[in-house]
Amino acid sequence: MTEEAYLEELRTGAQMKFEDLMTLVDENYNYIAASFTNGDFENGVTENQGSAKLFCFAAIHQLTQLEVLHCFGQYYQEVLNDPKGNEHTNIRNFITYGWAGLKFDSPVLTSK
């Protein structure tokens, strides 16, 4: 799937899958792991790098907060189904803090 096709599906409300975005990112971007902060949650350089890729892809494409959440696909749905749960901290913190809460130590994606 091309980036344009993925973004079109996202913006038309299609059911998104986290794995599809990871494949798209891996095919189109060089990746360098980096630590990042999401609200009050620290992610080390070896932790939650799928979320790091997703957030950076979303920033490159200037996605809205809701579009970002939909990119998490089934994991976002799990959060919605269990609003008081503890799983998927990056999703929960992004719901609370939005873009203002994200801080990366360095960029993780560059176009191939």
Image (cartoon, rainbow, N blue to C red):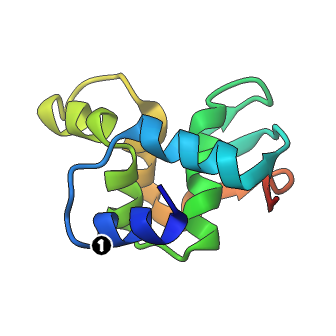
Quick check: 24 above or below 90?
Answer: below
- The residue indicated by pointer 1 is 11
- Left or right of residue 15: residue 87: right
Give the percent coordinates (x, y) of residue 6: 42, 62
- Report if residue 40 is visible in the image: no
- Left or right of residue 50: residue 111: right
* Residue type at numbered disc 1: Arg
Residue appearing at x 82%, y 40% in the figure? 34
Quick check: 90 above or below 3?
Answer: above
Q: Residue furthest front?
A: 1
Give the percent coordinates (x, y) of residue 91: 41, 42
Q: Residue furthest bottom?
A: 62
- Asked which quadrant contains residue 35, the reply is top right
- Left or right of residue 56: residue 85: left
Give the percent coordinates (x, y) of residue 94: 44, 52
- Asked which quadrant contains residue 82, the reply is top left
Quadrant location, the C terminus: bottom right
Give the percent coordinates (x, y) of residue 106: 86, 54
Secondary structure of the residue carrying numbered label 1: helix
Quick check: 30 above or below 11?
Answer: above
How packed mark 1 is, by other alpha carbons closer than 10 Å (few <14, some 14-19, many 20 or more), is few
Residue appearing at x 29%, y 72% in the figure? 11
Q: Residue furthest left?
A: 81
- Report if residue 84 is visible in the image: yes
